[in-house]
Structure formats: structure tokens, C-alpha cells
Image (cartoon, grey):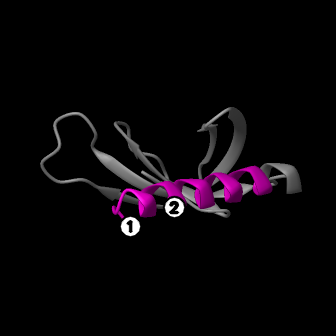
Amino acid sequence: SNISGGGAGLIHQERLAEGQLVNIMLVLSEHRLAVYARVVRVEPIANQAKWRYISGAQFINLSNREEDLVVKFIFREQLRLRQKGLL
């Protein structure tokens, strides 16, 4: 649901536990990164038929290259949304 250089918001069907390690596949335009993250919070989503939870997860042990790719992706997406008047 959202992403930063330090972590991501995840929307999912099964409840995750705080502290749980998860493997996430990030699709950043032309790059795909398999990263690990630790779940730091879990909240139920009301009135959703398909997705039932939103979690905040902090990336673990990202390399400098991986972090740079994430941050560059975020900046490109922000620029694209600004150009469309959506941000």
C-alpha cells in the first residue's frame, strides 16, 4: 500500500504477528528485489471483502544498492504523480 526507504505498508488476507519476519518481492519499475522485513504493526481493515489486514513492516539488512533503488523509485513515482496533478 505504501513504501519508504525504511519499510513498507502491506495489505494482506492472513493476520501477521508483530515481530514476524516476512519475505517481500518489491517490483520497482524495471527492478525486482526480494527483501526481508520485520512486521512492526498490524491493523484490521473494516468492511473489506478481499483484504483484511494492513501491516507496517521495516526492511531488514537492505544493501546500499537496494536502498538506493527503493528511494529512486519513490522519487520517480512522486514526480510522475505531481506531473499528473495527483500529488
For the question of whether residue 66 can be seen, the reply is yes
Instruction: Tell me the residue that label 2 is attached to.
Output: 78
Q: CA distance from mark 1 to mark 2?
A: 7 Å
Look at the image and tell me in which quarter the C terminus lies: bottom left
Tell me the residue that label 1 is attached to: 87
Disc 1 element: loop
Residue 19 in sight from this viewpoint: no
x, y (%) of residue 12?
38, 40
Q: Is residue 48 magenta?
A: no
- What is the x, y in percent for residue 5? 67, 62
Nearest to the observer: residue 18 or residue 27: 27
**Front in this rendered view, residue 5 or 35:** 5
The type of residue carrying mark 2 is Gln
Residue at horizontal 28 percent and vertical 54 percent from the top? 44
Is residue 76 shown in magenta?
Answer: yes
Tell me which residue sits at (53%, 54%) in the image.
77
Residue type of the residue flagged with mark 1: Leu
- Side (left or right) of 20 relative to 56: right
Q: Which residues are magenta?
A: 67-87
Say whether marks 1 and 2 touch (CB < 8 Å).
yes
Q: Main secondary structure of the magenta part?
A: helix
